[in-house]
Image: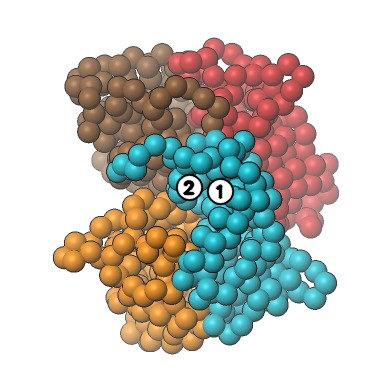
Chain colours: A red, B brown, C cyan, D orange
Amino acid sequence: MTDIDFPTLADQIRRFVSGQGFMRLVGAEIDELAPGLCVMSVARRPELLQQDGLFHGGVTAFLVDNATTTAAATRRQLDQRVLTAEYKLNLMAPARGERLICRASLLKPGRMAVVEARVFSREGAEDKLTAVALATIAMLSGPVRQG
Amino acid sequence: MTDIDFPTLADQIRRFVSGQGFMRLVGAEIDELAPGLCVMSVARRPELLQQDGLFHGGVTAFLVDNATTTAAATRRQLDQRVLTAEYKLNLMAPARGERLICRASLLKPGRMAVVEARVFSREGAEDKLTAVALATIAMLSGPVRQG
Amino acid sequence: MTDIDFPTLADQIRRFVSGQGFMRLVGAEIDELAPGLCVMSVARRPELLQQDGLFHGGVTAFLVDNATTTAAATRRQLDQRVLTAEYKLNLMAPARGERLICRASLLKPGRMAVVEARVFSREGAEDKLTAVALATIAMLSGPVRQG
Amino acid sequence: MTDIDFPTLADQIRRFVSGQGFMRLVGAEIDELAPGLCVMSVARRPELLQQDGLFHGGVTAFLVDNATTTAAATRRQLDQRVLTAEYKLNLMAPARGERLICRASLLKPGRMAVVEARVFSREGAEDKLTAVALATIAMLSGPVRQG
């Protein structure tokens, strides 16, 4: 539940995310945004790879970090700040595809939102599961204070 | 314990890591390499930040991913491949410093190595703890097979 | 893929698990066992609760630990030892039901198996999601050695 | 920082924890309590073991769950409720000792407290590191509301 209408919130989120220098450096895009959902992806290019020509684990982590936070932000209330508290990711299979796609879904809204993510490597017509993650996002109300 | 002498192994690791496109894109460097230890860092620049001028969480995750794997690799045996299985990180405080520094230490060597990492934001003379992480690195021997 | 037929493996797993003193102390049962799947549950009783009458988080953790390892063991090969390397769990909602049920499914088989778990609190006719977890299980072949 | 004096808070915590049915079933004890620190342990007995005579992973998880939450609670303010949001643990070495000891230290206080834990297996005069964990504890103020 949110007290901002979703199109307004979605515009705000897109503006915030595209204002991130690191988002532009990596070259990732928001593919889909719906209440409780964010799909983010990036095309393969040499600067995103490790020494064996696979997507670097850090690119996977970047997508997980950003997409899980954004999925939680889609349920943000007007007075809430959205802070990624923590996440855990399992790298399961080599990401050798043309595109790396992270699909993050809110499992539990609220002050301690829980978001699940799956990362796929697009290889031709197939999206191969390459990583899974679980994140905790704090939705803090009230004045900013330490912690 | 490793059957490769450490200076040779360290050279090999530095070559591998500097061969990563994403490492160059982010602009990170290995500051220190010792058996069971890797310190990696990156200087602040606009491309590494999020919308509020802090280091992006994805940069922290990149350093954690790379430094923990490298710390485990410093204890690699000749026939072992080093694969990051998973990690978990807690973002604890805003990283507003001039430099982001990740210090990864091997807690347990072996086939399922466990590595701990602390990430610091250098603000003037102070290194402020900004994130902590725990990673599992697989050291696999024998022929490459699925899984 | 396993080189032991499933009914034999399932019998062996049930024997192992029921041989655990802690499994008997908690009073948990295996409800379902299939290749890549384990459902384990326990009925509410005062000894399993915390001070507010909810299932103790440690009971949830016990089910997660045991059910994820068992789900991986259902795909064990004859020469493999199954070791829980790590897991992460998010406690999402109070578990005030009559029964606590953990459903663990193998996401990726292999030497570093990845297992996902969901824990439900049975309240009347409803199974309410109370926790989620992600585990890494090592399937080690060959002679036992340190690590 | 807390607005309750520490001896009063410590008494309250000991009363809460000893009021947990599961704490009594496992037979664990609080060995030490100080601001930001909790040491909890349990003696070996057959009901706490798995099939090979080691402490069951679920006992380790129980200690981690309880000791990390308690370490955060030592810094609780009068109006705060303490909720374990999540934790991750790595099981590193077999726990074959006479006693299992969990030492939890607060890394970061605040609304999203971060606690680190180390679990030791006491074998004769030696305390062997058997597991490590990282936990997030929510310290929520204000009226109870969903999430």
Q: Chain of mark 1?
A: C
The residue lying at 41 percent from left, 13 percent from top is B19
Asked if residue B8 is positioned above or below residue A89 in the image, the reply reads: above
User: How much space separates mark 2 and mark 1, taking CA atoms?
Assistant: 6 Å
Q: In the picture, residue C5 is in which quadrant?
A: top right
User: Is residue A89 depicted above or below A49 in this figure?
Assistant: below
Task: Name the disc covering residue C73, or none.
Answer: 1
Residue found 38% across the figure and 86% down from its top: D11
Q: Position of residue C83 (x, y in %)?
A: 45, 49
Give me the residue at 75% from left, 43% from top: A37
Name the chain under label 2.
C
Residue D142 occupies quadrant? bottom right
For mark 2, what is the residue? Answer: C82
Q: Nearer the viewer, residue D4 or B133?
A: B133
Q: Position of residue B73 (x, y in %)?
A: 33, 29
* Mark 2, secondary structure of its residue: strand
Q: Residue C67, image x and y in percent?
A: 59, 57
